[in-house]
């Protein structure tokens, strides 16, 4: 109901691209200065990664991935529309892309970087194999992003980071005190899954996993986890089977509506599956809102005016 025309849709993309650009600049500046705490932003939790306005680096990276998609969609539309009025807009958006990419990379979030890789490859393959109108300028921009990405990682952060930054399954967690733990994502996922049987119908309530972890997880350190690191098991645990099914049934018609089918929605669905299985970003309201907005963007037919 808010976005009636293509103009409204792309205006939102511009705002989101600008927000990602500003957030990335601030995140990188904080990162280069050792991530000091600033007002309500507790950046020192991740003093070796850029988080910007977000406490969690993965949430920041997922937000920036949506900003990246907005910038790419804008560039794609500008390249297809050869109006001279778009000349300076294209320069701005390309600048936004550079800083948003740097923001995602320096978050060192393996999930976030993996989503970045999927996004870039998706647009590249889509441009090569599926687009009827070949947009060579846009294809070159995608290749430059990949090349730029490899330069940053390969020469500045070290060649070993190129592969390691995408290997999100090995990521361990550490406590605020800095103790090192051998607990992996799989340990947290296994614990959350095994506890489901004790709260099968009505769940343990929103935000209850942290207390459950402290009470029942066998742990030799002072560390704790406040999320399962797999949203699907945490949603099941929090809402129980009854609450979870109510949520599923409320959205199932939308996801199986043929009008919702588009290549970009396939990308967004891929994001949601990865996050549901291996992260907890879908618990964050702004990420939930962005998922919904992007789904509806690619469901509705827009007028040109």
Image (spheres, grey):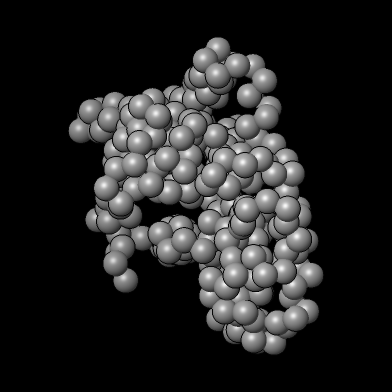
**Total label count?**
0
Quarter occupied by residue 293: bottom left
Q: Nearer the viewer, residue 12 or 131?
A: 12
Nearer-the-camera pick, 53 or 132: 53
Residue for point 58% across, 47% down: 175
Which residue is pictured at 66% across the width and 74% down the height? 236
Q: Do we see residue 153 in this rendering? A: yes
| Image side of residue 170 versus residue 52, left or right | right
Task: Name which residue lies at 29% across and 43% down.
Answer: 38
Viewer-proximal residue among 187 and 68:
187
Image quadrant of residue 214? bottom right
Residue 216 falls left or right of residue 267: right
Q: Is residue 242 above or below residue 21?
A: below
Quarter containing the C terminus: bottom left
Q: Position of residue 34 (x, y in %)?
A: 40, 29
Q: Residue farthest to the top? A: 155
Residue drawn at point x = 73 percent, y = 53 percent = 220
Q: Position of residue 265 (x, y in %)?
A: 55, 56
The reply to whether residue 75 is visible in this rendering is no
| Quadrant of the image containing the N terminus | bottom left
Q: Position of residue 255 (x, y in %)?
A: 59, 69
Name above or below for residue 89 compared with residue 14: above
């Amino acid at each position: 109901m808010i976005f009636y025309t293509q103009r409204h849709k792309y205006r939102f993309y511009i705002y989101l691209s600008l927000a990602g650009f500003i957030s990335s600049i601030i995140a990188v500046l904080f990162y280069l200065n050792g991530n000091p705490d600033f007002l309500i932003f507790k950046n020192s939790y991740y003093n070796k990664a850029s988080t910007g306005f977000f406490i969690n680096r993965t949430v920041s990276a997922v937000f920036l991935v949506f900003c990246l998609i907005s910038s790419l969609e804008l560039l794609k539309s500008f390249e297809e529309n050869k109006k001279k009025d778009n000349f300076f807009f294209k320069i701005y958006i390309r600048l936004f892309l550079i800083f948003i990419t740097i923001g995602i990379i320096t978050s060192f979030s393996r999930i976030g970087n993996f989503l970045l890789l999927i996004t870039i490859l998706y647009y590249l393959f889509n441009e090569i194999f599926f687009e009827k109108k070949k947009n060579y300028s846009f294809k070159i921009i995608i290749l430059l992003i990949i090349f730029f990405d490899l330069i940053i990682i390969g020469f500045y952060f070290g060649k070993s980071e190129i592969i390691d930054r995408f290997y999100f399954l090995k990521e361990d967690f550490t406590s605020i005190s800095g103790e090192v733990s051998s607990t992996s994502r799989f340990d947290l996922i296994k614990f959350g899954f095994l506890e489901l049987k004790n709260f099968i119908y009505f769940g343990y309530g929103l935000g209850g996993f942290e207390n459950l972890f402290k009470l029942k997880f066998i742990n030799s350190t002072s560390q704790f986890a406040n999320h399962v690191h797999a949203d699907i098991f945490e949603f099941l645990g929090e809402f129980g089977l009854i609450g979870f099914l109510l949520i599923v049934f409320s959205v199932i018609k939308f996801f199986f509506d043929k009008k919702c089918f588009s290549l970009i929605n396939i990308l967004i669905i891929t994001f949601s599956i990865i996050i549901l299985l291996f992260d907890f970003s879908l618990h964050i309201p702004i990420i939930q809102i962005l998922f919904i907005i992007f789904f509806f963007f690619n469901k509705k037919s827009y007028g040109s005016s």
